Image (tube, rainbow, N blue to C red):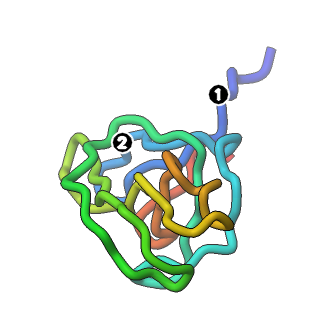
Amino acid sequence: MGEVVGPRLYCCYKCRNHVSLHDDIISKAFQGRHGRAFLFSHAMNIVVGVKEDRHLMTGLHTVADISCADCNEVLGWKYERAYEASQKYKEGKFIFEKSKIVKENW
């Protein structure tokens, strides 16, 4: 028997806390504050911050920063509300900055 391989995960780059599953990636074509970012359908072991309206490249959205539940590093944001019909698919989804997450079990 080989070693047991778990699901492919993304972790906080600082403390290696598991924050999302590879299978939950919706898109890798997003832009974060610090470069490339990924859109995920789910996140785990995170803390959702205060909601605020932000003007992003795709229009006005209500977002909340998401932080690692262990080390409090801000990893991205959660889309709480999209004001334009074409952006509604983002509601309830999570953006992780590519530079703030690392792969595990790949």
- Residue most toward the top? 1
Is the residue 43 above or below the residue 75 in the image? Answer: above
Looking at numbered disc 2 in the image, what kind of residue is underneath it?
Answer: Asn
Q: Secondary structure at mark 1?
A: loop
- Residue most toward the right? 1
Task: Indicate the position of residue 28 as horizontal and vertical percent values.
Answer: 68, 67
Task: Indicate the position of residue 78 as horizontal and vertical percent values.
Answer: 41, 54
Q: Which residue is mark 1?
A: 6
In three-dimensional space, the C-alpha distance between marks 1 and 2, rounded to whole angstroms, equals 15 Å
Q: Secondary structure at mark 2?
A: loop
Q: Which residue is mark 2?
A: 17
Nearest the viewer among 84 and 22 is 84
**Residue depicted at 59% across the width and 44% down the height:** 41
Looking at numbered disc 1 in the image, what kind of residue is underneath it?
Answer: Gly
Nearest the viewer among 18 and 97 is 97
Horizontal placement of 51 versus 84: left or right? Answer: left
Give the tally of numbered discs: 2
The quadrant where residue 90 appears:
bottom right
Badge number at residue 80: none
Graded by Cα atoms within 10 Å as few (under 14), some (14 to 19) or many (20 or more), the crowding at tag 1 reads: few
